[in-house]
Amino acid sequence: MKKVFIKILATVFGLGYAPILSGTLGTLVGIPLFLGLSRLEWSLYFLVTLLFTIFAIVVANAALPLLQDAKKPADPSQIVIDEVAGFLWAAGIVRYLGFWKPVEGFWWFLLFSFVFFRIFDAAKWGPVGWAERRWHGGFGIVIDDVVAGIVAGFVSILFCILVPFVVFALLAG
């Protein structure tokens, strides 16, 4: 029974078994979770996100011997709880450091954090790839997504700041 429960959590209720885009489906679960948490004070939000990240590490570590992926033996594609944790970091950074409040609208901030998180998680550029190569086990499975989320959060904020200036310059010039 414990093994089944670990698999359910690691695959985020079976989404990790999707033949394609399992990581994207896992990330989508992060959206309603983020929206539920986004009304918290920043310190409580990041404490909950940190605790969820630790929980994801424990679950991923327990699931690693239960879920096999010949293409990715160190990070089976069925484990998608790490995507949820990574997205919570991305969206939290946009929400709290970008001073975005869900009640204000501006849903593109949420869209940008989602898209940039998926790009950085899939491409493994820079610190994301380094984290993936550096650590292993449950910590390694989750930490590269956390790094991707942190980078995506800051890139989303920069994107939202710079794009209006570029558009204005193009229209004015």
Image: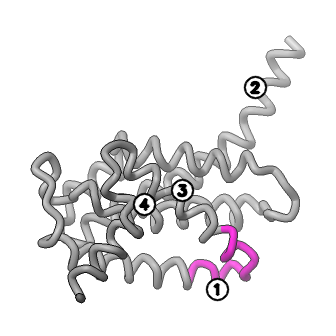
- Label 3 and label 2: CA atoms lie apart by 30 Å
Question: What separation in Å lies between label 4 and label 3 (alpha carbons)?
Answer: 9 Å
Which numbered disc, 3 or 1, marks the residue closer to the eye?
Answer: 3
Q: What residue did someone put label 1 on?
A: 44
Of the numbered discs 4 and 2, the one sitting upstream in the chain is 4
Residue 95 is left or right of residue 10, and the answer is: right
Image quarter of residue 97: bottom right
Residue 40 colored in magenta in the image: yes
Q: Determine the secondary structure under disc 1.
A: helix
| Residue holding disc 3 | 28
- Residue shown at 36% from the left, 75% from the top: 9
Tag count in the figure? 4
Looking at the image, tell me whether mark 3 or mark 1 is earlier in sequence order.
3
Question: Hey, what amino acid is under mark 3?
Answer: Leu
Residue at the spot x=15%, y=54% of the render?
69
Q: Residue at x 46, y 53 (%)?
A: 25
Three-letter residue code for mark 1: Leu
Q: Which mark is residue 166?
A: 2
Give the image location of residue 39, x and y in percent.
75, 77
> Taking 168 as reference, is 89 above or below it?
below
Instruction: From the top left corner, tell me how far across and down residue 80 is, in percent.
Output: 36, 62
Q: Position of residue 131 (x, y in %)?
A: 28, 58
Please tell me which of labels 4 and 3 falls first in the chain: 3
- Quadrant (top left/top right/bottom left/bottom right) for the N terminus: bottom left
